[in-house]
Image (cartoon, rainbow, N blue to C red):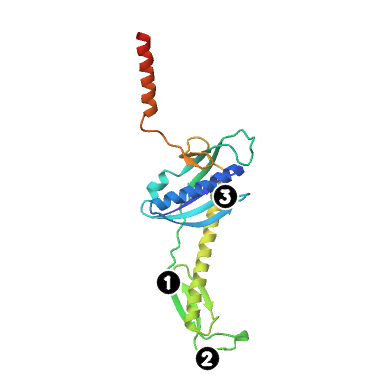
Amino acid sequence: MEKLIQITSGRGPLECQWVAAKVLKTFLEEAKQNTIEYEIIHRENGDENLTLKSVTVLLKGKEVTPFLKNWLGSVCWIGKSTFRKLHKRSNWFIGIFELENIKMIDFNEKDIRFQTARSQGSGGQNVNKVNTAVRATHIPTNETVFVQDSRSQLENKKLSVIRLKEKVMAVYIRQLERKLKDTWSLQMQVERGNPVRTFSGTDFKKNYEDKTFKKQRNALKNELKNYNNDLN
């Protein structure tokens, strides 16, 4: 299972960019804990060090879908701005969205067709009497490279694989960039309220509900104690 997600500060101020960077770190740590592989596909750094405007991450793993259920939506950080000490705002929101309908490119050497040819010099003059040049074609995308850097056919073949992969991935990146442009509106729609995750403090601790009901029991004990005192 593969999923492509985007963590974005939207049009939020510098504080939101700081939160986006913090969320990315926590997000990747939890992904690793859930045995989910990840790869950062696209990243736009923020206006200051250690801040982030947006990042696109490719996730791979069996538990990707349930993992994302606890992340997709708005994420809130509660705390005072570290950039503007006197700023009154304490709730800062960013968004995490899934980028859908993007076909993943699976680059595999088995999908490459190799053809050999004589290396050519300037003006078409043969510079090698043996077939050392290599033309490599990625069959699924029909992308092609021609390599004649070395006098060794094996070295040219290795280089052709590297360059072909770069070329194929460049096609994927262009496709991704078009999708990012189309989904820019998502960055403008970071919702405030009802966040799927809430963090607080400069150490970015996760807020959680106390499920032991300790506070409630203590409150009831105090009420009962006061009631008994009133009876006496």
Residue 20 x, y percent position in the rendering = 54, 46
**Residue closest to the eye, 45 or 85:** 85
Which mark is drawn over residue 52?
3
Classify residue 89 by image quadrant: top right
Residue 70 x, y percent position in the rendering = 42, 43
Which residue is depicted at the point 39% across and 33% down? 210
Q: Nearer the viewer, mark 3 or mark 1?
A: 3
Name the secondary structure under disc 1.
helix
Residue 127 x, y percent position in the rendering = 57, 88
Location of mark 1 (residue): 109
Name which residue type carries label 2: Lys
Which residue is depicted at the point 48% across and 54% down? 57
In this view, 151 is above or below 37: below
In this view, 130 is above or below 220: below
Instruction: Tell me how far mark 3 sits from mark 1, CA to CA.
Output: 35 Å
Comes first in the chain, label 1 or label 2 = 1
In this view, 133 is above or below 206: below
Residue 73 x, y percent position in the rendering = 47, 42
Residue 18 appears left or right of 216: right
Location of mark 2 (residue): 129
Name the secondary structure under disc 2.
loop
Name the secondary structure under disc 3.
strand
Figure disc tally: 3
